[in-house]
Image (cartoon, rainbow, N blue to C red):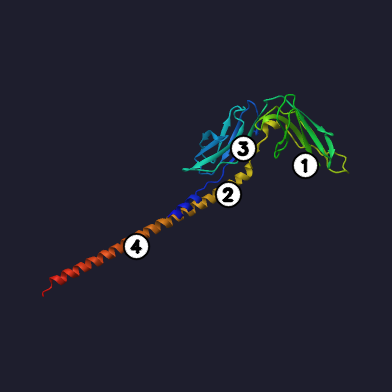
């Protein structure tokens, strides 16, 4: 029986939820944001953890939106910037925690200046250096390139920091901004944008165009931990979980049938023993009652 319980516990493990934020992982001070958490279709409750502690609880809405919830943040501050994770409950069982989601509040310090050397128009194979400078002393600088797959680069410094890129290719072209910070979750205002143009090859005299960036990019950038792939992953996991539950039901049925069969056999043997004892008793009485 212990082995059966172990199998049941393993089969009942829930898949990891997905977590994301809109409109961006960088939120200006005072602006609203919303964190989403997606679990299995049977989820009845979600919890959001902030820096390891409970932040909020939500229940999913009725269909068709039944396997994810939204945790609103009315106004972003330094107290709501940090690391978030979520989990969900199905029945009495809680899932494992999601991957971490890092939220950053911007607009807390002065505005840095960003420059690029030797120039903003270069040829593939050259090296460039972005220099971010802040009037007030800080400890950390971040350089961020526009684009949905972009991730910040980090450098430590007091009043300035340099970010070296190269040899560059057309992949490096785009719009860059930098931030100053005293920690990883509280950033300054963004610098003015600097566009890097990269010529594709030596025979091409036309600089490749910069990638499309809208004026409200910094308010509309969406950061996810693989939201689309996670969505497909969870659809697959949902089907797998249904199959597991079906197999679990069959296993429980087999165990019950086995227990019933064992009980029936036990009763049958007990009845047979009782009948033998009864027949022996009758035989003894008949022998004592017969005439000598």
Counting from the top left corner in percent of width and height, residue 97 is at: 56, 41
Instruction: Give me the residue at 56% from left, 44% from top.
Output: 16
| Element marked by disc 3 | strand
Image quadrant in which the C terminus is located: bottom left
Between discs 4 and 3, the one toward the N terminus: 3
Q: Quadrant of residue 259?
A: bottom left
- What residue does disc 3 label? 101
- What residue does disc 4 label? 265
Q: Is residue 65 visible?
A: no
- What residue does disc 1 label? 171
Closest to the camera, between mark 3 and mark 1, is 3
Q: Residues within 10 Å of mark 3 (few under 14, many from 20)?
A: many
Image quadrant in which the N terminus is located: bottom left
Q: Quadrant of residue 132?
A: top right
Relative vertical location of residue 2 with respect to residue 29 in this rendering, above or below: below
| Element marked by disc 1 | helix
Question: Residue 52 got which mark?
Answer: none
Q: Is residue 280 visible?
A: yes
Between discs 2 and 1, the one toward the N terminus: 1
């Amino acid at each position: 029986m212990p082995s059966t319980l172990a199998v049941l516990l393993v089969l009942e493990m829930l898949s990891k939820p997905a977590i994301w934020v809109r409109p961006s992982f960088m939120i200006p001070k005072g602006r609203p944001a919303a964190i989403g958490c997606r679990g299995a279709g049977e989820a009845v409750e979600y919890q959001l953890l902030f820096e390891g502690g409970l932040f909020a609880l939500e229940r999913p809405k009725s269909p068709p939106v039944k396997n994810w919830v939204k945790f609103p943040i009315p106004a972003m501050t330094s107290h709501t910037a940090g690391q978030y994770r979520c989990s969900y409950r199905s029945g009495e069982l809680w899932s494992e925690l999601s991957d971490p989601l890092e939220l950053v509040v911007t607009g807390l310090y002065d505005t840095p200046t960003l420059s690029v050397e030797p120039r903003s128009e270069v040829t593939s194979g050259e090296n460039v250096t972005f220099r971010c400078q802040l009037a007030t002393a800080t400890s950390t600088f971040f350089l961020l390139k526009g684009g949905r797959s972009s991730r910040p680069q980090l450098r430590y410094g007091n009043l300035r920091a340099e970010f070296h890129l190269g040899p560059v290719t057309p992949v490096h072209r785009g719009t860059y901004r930098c931030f100053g910070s005293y920690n990883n979750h509280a950033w300054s205002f963004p610098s003015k944008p600097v566009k890097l143009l990269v010529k594709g090859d030596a025979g091409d005299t036309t600089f490749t165009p910069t990638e499309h960036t809208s004026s409200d990019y910094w308010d509309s950038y969406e950061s996810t931990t693989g939201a689309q792939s996670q969505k497909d992953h969870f659809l697959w996991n949902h089907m797998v979980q249904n199959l597991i539950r079906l197999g679990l039901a069959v296993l429980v049925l087999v165990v019950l049938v086995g227990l019933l069969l064992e009980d029936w056999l036990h009763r049958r043997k007990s009845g047979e023993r009782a009948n033998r004892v009864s027949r022996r008793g009758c035989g003894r009485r008949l022998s004592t009652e017969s005439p000598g």
